[in-house]
Amino acid sequence: MAINNSQRAVPATELYATMTGASVLIGTLLANPTIIIFDSFSTVAVEISIGAVVWKTFAAGEALVLDMSAAHALAANYTFDIGTSFYGNGASGDFSISYLYARNN
C-alpha cells in the first residue's frame, strides 16, 4: 500500500463560545477535520446541535476526541462537511471545538 506523503496536519482556528442559556453558534468548520476535539469548560451540561439535530449532551467538564484519520488522513471519505455549524446550549460556561485537517503540500 502506498503512503500519501503529500498531506500534512494543519491546526484550524479554534471554535469557541460562551453558553448563555439559549442556543449559540460555537462555530463553523472551514475544512474537513481529521481529528476534532470537543471540550466543555462548563460546570453544567451543554447540549451540542448540528443544525436541528441534537448530537450529544456533554456533562460538565467533559471532553471528546474523534480521530477521523483512519483512512491515512484522507478524511474527506468520512468526516464532518466543510461548512458544518455547531451550536451549544447550556446555562453557563464555555465550550470549544478544536480540529486538525489535512493539507496537500
Image (cartoon, rainbow, N blue to C red):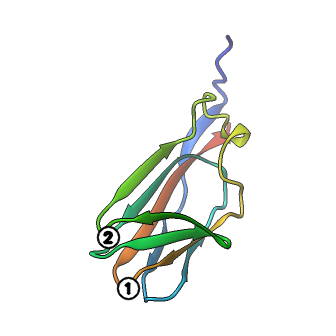
> Which of labels 1 and 2 is toward the front?
1
Nearest to N terminus: mark 1 or mark 2: 2
Judge from the rendering whether residue 99 lies leftward or rightward of residue 46; answer left or right.
right
Depth check: 52 or 79 in front? 52
- Name the disc covering residue 91, or none: 1
- Name the disc covering residue 43, or none: none
Q: Amino acid at mark 2?
A: Phe
Depth check: 39 or 5 in front? 39
Q: 10 Å neighbourhood of mark 2: few (<14), some, or many (≥20)? A: some
Q: Quadrant of residue 39?
A: bottom left
Q: Amino acid at mark 1?
A: Ala
Placement of the C terminus among the 4 image quadrants: top right
Instruction: Name the residue rendered at 55%, 57% in the picture.
Output: 12
Q: Position of residue 1 (x, y in %)?
A: 67, 10
Contact (CB < 8 A) between labels 1 and 2?
no
Q: Position of residue 72 (x, y in %)?
A: 61, 28
Instruction: Name the residue rendered at 64%, 34% in the picture.
Output: 7
Instruction: Name the residue rendered at 68%, 13% in the picture.
Output: 2
Element under label 1? loop
Q: Position of residue 98 (x, y in %)?
A: 47, 58
Q: 10 Å neighbourhood of mark 1: few (<14), some, or many (≥20)? A: some
Instruction: Name the residue rendered at 43%, 48% in the picture.
Output: 65
Q: Is residue 63 above or below residue 74?
A: below
Element under label 2? loop
- Number of numbered tags placed on the structure image: 2
Judge from the rendering whether residue 1 lies leftward or rightward of residue 60; answer left or right.
right
Q: Which residue is mark 2?
A: 41
Q: CA distance from mark 1 to mark 2?
A: 12 Å
Q: Quadrant of residue 45?
A: bottom left
